[in-house]
Image: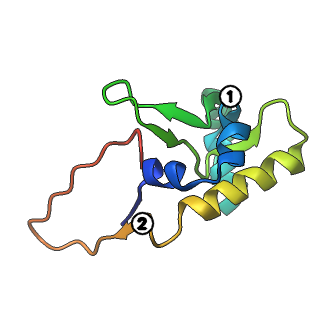
Amino acid sequence: TEFCDMRSAYAALPERLKVLIEDLQAEHSIVHSRGLVDPTVLTEAQKAETPPVRQRLVRINPINGRKALYIGAHASHIVGWPLEKGRALLAELTELGTGPEFCLSHAWREGDLIVWDNRCV
């Protein structure tokens, strides 16, 4: 299992990227992410039951005020951007955010317990 620290990844972004993404939203869809692996994995009924949702690329933790990237395989495109340009930005952010300096790989052993904050991984 891998966990990537999206708070630290956001903090390490060049200022130009922070400014660019501050108010952007991505459309997130399980249909998109599952389709990357196998476009036939979901039935039409399942697709209809899981509509896409819009999420900000930068989320602010309500407790500590720290910003974090909110990206992943479910993010299909940037709302309001041309498809290829938005996907290129998502790919750039994903590459930056999943570098070894931000990620922990855990090999599970019996008795292990890990607690994480889903808002920032």
Q: Which residue is mark 2?
A: 103
Please tell me whether mark 1 or mark 2 is closer to you in this view: 1
Tell me which colouring the rendered structure shows: rainbow
- Could you tell me residue 47's position as x and y percent? 67, 36
Q: Label for residue 23? A: 1
Q: Quadrant of residue 43?
A: top right
Q: Is residue 17 left or right of residue 80?
A: left
Residue farthest toward the left in the current orientation of the protein: 111
Q: Is residue 114 left or right of residue 30?
A: left
**For mark 1, does the 10 Å Cα neighbourhood hold few (<14), some (14 to 19), or many (20 or more) residues?**
few
Earlier residue among tags 1 and 2 = 1
Three-letter code for the amino acid on which mark 2 is drawn: Cys
At horizontal 42% and vertical 66% (from top left) the residue drawn is 103
At horizontal 22% and vertical 50% (from top left) the residue drawn is 115
Residue 92 in the image: above or below residue 56 = below
Q: Quadrant of residue 93?
A: bottom right
CA gap between label 1 and label 2 equals: 25 Å
Helix, strand or loop status at disc 1: loop
Nearer to the camera, 116 or 74: 116
**For mark 2, does the 10 Å Cα neighbourhood hold few (<14), some (14 to 19), or many (20 or more) residues?**
some
Q: Quadrant of the N terminus?
A: bottom left
